Amino acid sequence: MSDSEVQRWDRAHVWHPYTKASTLEAGPAPVIVRGDGIYLVDAEGRRFVDAISSWWCAALGHGHPRIVAAIQGQAGVLQHSILANLTHPQAAELAARLAGMMPTRERRVLFASDGASAVEQALKIAVQYWSNVGRGAKRKFACLHTAYHGDTLGAMAVGYLEEWHRPFQSLLAEVVALPFPVGAGEFGVWERALEAHRTELAAVIVEPLCLGAAGMLMYAPELLRALGDWCARNEVLLIDDEVAMGFGRTGRMFAFEHAGVDPDLVCVGKALSGGALPMSATIAKQFLYDSFSDAERDRTLQHGHTFCGNPIGAAAANEALQIYAEMDAPARARSLGARMAKRLGALRGKRGVRDVRGLGLIGVVELEPEANCGAISRPHRIRLRLQERGVLLRPLGNVLYLMPPLIISEEELDALVELFVGAIESELAMAGAAEGK
Ligand code: PMP
């Protein structure tokens, strides 16, 4: 298959997610044919640093030999078998591993493929739980304003972003949106909104500590701690969406650990399989599962995706979890993150830079909005500049960020950060010159 054939088929038939048609008209999308550690390699052999870990999932980079071996080994034995009234070794092991990573082991794990499905499952478990225990009036959700939880209808309701989801607004369930951002000592702002709906709330769902898609907006662990306490005191479940932040990225295995809370439901995905295969899970406390008993009447959870717990995905995930433990992924994110933050700190206070922030191995530079941007906005000019220099990233509005694979070496990270800072400084210098300053 030639490169031009790929481009032709792509132009005629591929619907690219989150991609403006105009950007594809401006030039064809790079054809990625191979992955190698922190690099994605295109058809011409050019190597690009995957600076956002392919939408935050490739925590172990690409082609990790142990993940490849796990996939190959399992593919030769059993590719798929459903988990309804059956089980298989990989899913059972993975469920036990995930339960063992929670503050207490008494958990049940419902698998799915994508993050959004893990979130939908958590929402449905929460609502049916309250119905199971005879409290059916509790079926509303509270969420953080501008949080993101996926693109399905339930997930969009609790993760409404005006510029992405407006056409669907009338289809979405009514939620209690907690104001965001709020300062570390301002839990009272959330508390007032929660109190007004206390008796009808099934659950509060959060992105822990960092609202990713909204632009890596961070909040203090104290707020999550206070929220967890409030939920426990008020018979409201806490759903923690670790799809983006889980598995070491923030400097703890799960971001909720920074706050010392013990969520009732935890959603994981993305890096669960090392980013190699679609695999996600909803981890529920045992008391939730127990309420689904059919001993007196049938309360079975009538929910399940075809590829729930797929053996090949589960094999990749079991290996990935083993690797995260052996490499001490949280410690690695902390030390590499501190290194990155030091260098990015040089941009703080520079003209055109609104904020520099970080959490674990996430480094963020937020630019001031442009007065009058041309056809291509400043963040995208920086993106293209970096693409020419062999770095792939995707800005979120005016936010540029690095979220590289956790396996990146110190030297590779230093080189990446230099290119990133250099591209931002050059673009800001050109803007300054154009303004005659
Ligand atoms: N939750 C969070 C916090 C996410 O960041 C994402 C994806 N960016 C999702 C859920 C949805 O995951 P998926 O794209 O795998 O459906």
Image: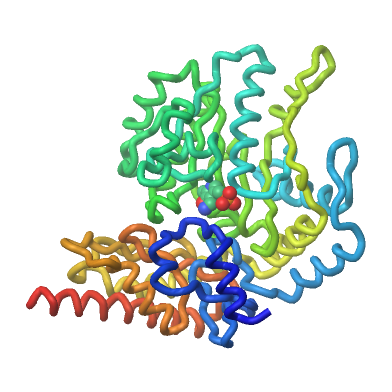
Q: Tell me the quadrant of the picture where the C terminus can be found.
A: bottom left
Where's residue 80, x and y in %?
A: 85, 52
Q: Residue at x 38, y 19 (%)?
A: 196
Where's residue 361, x and y in %?
A: 49, 66
Determine the image quadrant of residue 194: top left
Q: Which residue is drawn at 60% across and 80% down?
A: 3
Q: In this view, does 105 lie to the left or right of 52?
A: right
Determine the image quadrant of residue 293: top right
Where's residue 257, x and y in %?
A: 55, 49
Q: Using the image, determine if residue 219 lies above or below residue 323.
A: above
Q: Residue at x 61, y 56 (%)?
A: 270
Along the line of sight, the residue nearer the viewer: 255 or 364: 364
Determine the image quadrant of residue 121: top right
Query: Farthest residue in the bottom direction?
Result: 45
Along the line of sight, the residue nearer the viewer: 345 or 150: 150
Q: Residue at x 50, y 32 (%)?
A: 204
Along the line of sight, the residue nearer the viewer: 180 or 410: 180
The mark tally for this picture is 0
Q: Tell me the quadrant of the picture where the N terminus can be found.
A: bottom right
Query: Farthest residue in the left direction?
Result: 436
Name the colour scheme: rainbow
Q: Using the image, determine if residue 122 lies above or below residue 12.
A: above
Residue 271 in view here: yes
Where's residue 2, x and y in %?
A: 64, 81
Residue 256 in view here: no
